[in-house]
Amino acid sequence: QVQLQESGPGLVKPSETLSLTCTVSGGSIINHYWSWIRQPPGKGLEWIGYIYFTGTTNYNPSLKSRVTISVDTSKNQFSLKLSSVTAADTAVYYCARGGGWWGDWGQGTLVTVSS
Amino acid sequence: QSALTQPASVSGSPGQSITISCTGTSSDVGGYNYVSWYEQHPGKAPKLMIYDVSNRPSGVSNRFSGSKSGNTASLTISGLQAEDEADYYCNSYTSSNTYVFGTGTKVTVL
């Protein structure tokens, strides 16, 4: 079964760029969609966007101006960049396999935006 | 895009059946058969329970079932068990080619 693992800084300063990477093991990144989903502490889930292994992307309109999702098939990884972060971007960030429903998830990583 | 509407909480006794609703519009839930449901225990990642309205992934108990009528999708848990106590979220494809989650429902087993 495929496994996903998020990695990246747990603390980001306001106005800076949040950068996370998801490493896929136990399966290939080829021929699949890969997504990022986040959950602010004590709140619900929010879809951030997805990328197909070819590089085609689709983003949440509310985040589109600040989000970039990229894929590195040679490393079996995909990444998230969220620019100009504020405290409202503090959340657990999950990577997941799928574009429209998500059967495999990473454990999640808490990113706090604070100076 | 506004979050889909779910009841904040639903409760039931062991062995009973409960139903969680997920209400959207004709531009999301009502317009497509692309509704999925997720179970989330505290501190854990969500788990897929239902996809494409009523399909159950391999390994998910047949006590979980999904359906849709108009702009409202539903998740039914039959034979409620203590381990079903968790938060549940629905998700739908939208006419904007995006995806939106529901507000979430806390299920309590009395």
Image: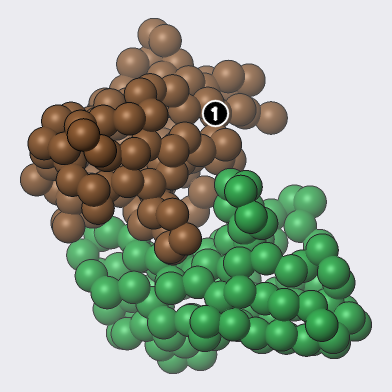
Chain colours: A brown, B green
Q: Quadrant of residue B30?
A: bottom left
Residue A77 in view in this figure: yes
Q: Quadrant of residue B51?
A: bottom right
Q: Nearer the viewer, residue A64 or B94?
A: A64
Name the image quarter holding the C terminus of chain A: top left
| Number of marks drawn | 1
B13 to A80, vertically: above or below? below
Q: Circle 1 marks a residue in which chain?
A: A
Residue at the (27%, 39%) spot, across then down? A113
What SS does tag 1 mark?
Answer: strand
The residue labelled by disc 1 is A4
Q: Quadrant of residue B98?
A: bottom left
Residue at the front extreme, as displayed: A115
**Image location (x, y in percent) of residue A66:** 13, 41
Residue at the bottom extreme, as displayed: B70
How many residues crowd around disc 1 within 10 Å: few (fewer than 14), some, or many (20 or more)?
many
